[in-house]
Image: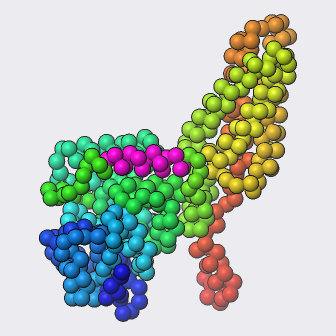
Amino acid sequence: MVHDAGRSPGGPPALDIVIPVFNEERTLVGSVEAVREHLRTLPFEHRITIADNASTDATSLLAHQLAARFDDVRVVSLTQKGRGRALKRAWSQSDAEVLVYMDVDLSTDLNALLPLVAPLLSGHSDLAIGSRLARTSRTTRGPKREVISRAYNVLLRGALRARFSDAQCGFKAIRRDVAEQLLPLVEDDEWFFDTELLVVAERAGLRIHEVPVDWIDDPDSRVDIVRTAAADLRGMGRLGWSLLRGRVPLADVTRTLGRASRRSAGGRISAQMVVFALIGGLSTLAYGGLFIVLRGSLGAQQANAVALAITAIANTAANRRFTFGLRGTTGALRHQLQGLLVFACGLAVTSGVLWLMRATGGDSHPVVEVLVLTAANLFVTVMRFVAMRVWMFRRPPVVSTVGMQQDRERRQHPQTAD
């Protein structure tokens, strides 16, 4: 249920400040009044949305009383708990240009709000986050939470290659058009929601702006650290597996928003190299096993050709899906034909190595042949990666939807062009 008392009479507001709450009857009124007072210093139309997360105390009553008192306050009521669920509901129902989220305890100094939203309102960035771990941030909290927070973000950088510094700070903002594309892709409805949103945005090539914040730990926090940490680890595993399998349509988000370059749409080269190397390692093991099995009945040259052909087909299919994120049958046959052409080049290299071994040393032990051919295949692997990235799986340029609209307007109204 949504109480719409907070709609601006002049149209959609620039900012919608969402405050998720669960049993916050002691702090809700004071926090909302403090946020309203601060928003009066900013030159933007605004709204405050209280997302009541299935509270069982007087929180819901107080929230609706605030909405009745103030035209810029509304309430979104949910019947289930979950911070992510509350933000999804409130953000998806908002018509504001920029959607903000902050904790009800106001641990983050509100003076960071303007630096948080300004890059989004100007169109410079797509998301913005407050960071307690930036060098210029000032935080007051116990050593236990400090260690856990830093360890979690180090783990994110290692496991999911995240580049943002603070995933869980309760002070974030996102452009509404970006939220419309990203929210359907975020599966988590609880505490991992923030991390998943940021990782998906980063992988799609969107720009994340970080703001150093002054932050004071809430001693009355009721977050179950152990349970939350376990849920976050499960979320990291699920998200990492989904990204590895290409289940998240990152390129579609990039193309729709038109924010990023072709390079970002295609994925970071370092990430692609890691996945490519894993697939290449498995392919090399499979090639070696097949060569040894087939050599006795087919001979070295024939066994090399058959083993390389089988692993090349499997390698192309695996890299198409996992390394470069292409799914479906569109272009699959063309990619396999291109892969076979690259395979032919690899076959020429390895066959040449075998011929050279025969010409210079006569018959060699199968293990020696495998070692020499493996070295040759390393060269072929590098050649294959370059061919895949710049030729086989090269993505078309990402055309900015904003630029397309501007071009149409210039053609329709040439007299207004500069």
Q: Which of the 4 image quadrants contains residue 403? A: bottom right
Q: Nearer the viewer, residue 97 or 291?
A: 291
Q: Is 234 colored magenta in this rendering?
A: yes
Q: What is the x, y in percent for residue 17?
A: 32, 74
Residue at horizontal 56%, vertical 56%?
248
Up-down: is 147 above or below 375?
Answer: below
Count of marks placed on residues = 0
Residue at left offset 37%, top offset 63%: 84
Q: Quadrant of residue 48?
A: bottom left
Side (left or right) of 239 relative to 366:
left
Quarter placement of the N terminus: bottom left
Percent x, y of residue 52: 29, 73
Q: Is residue 2 visible to us here?
A: yes
116 is higher (above) or lower (below) than 323: below
Q: Please, what is the dominant secondary structure of the magenta stretch?
A: helix
| Depth check, front residue: 36 or 241 | 241
Residue 211 on image: x %, y %: 33, 60
Camera-nearest residue between 365 and 109 = 365
Q: In the rendered image, is residue 113 in sight?
A: no
> Which residue is drawn at the image coordinates 65% and 47% (left, top)?
321
Q: Quadrant of the C terminus?
A: bottom right
Drawn side of residue 52 relative to residue 289, left or right: left
Q: Which residues are magenta?
A: 229-243
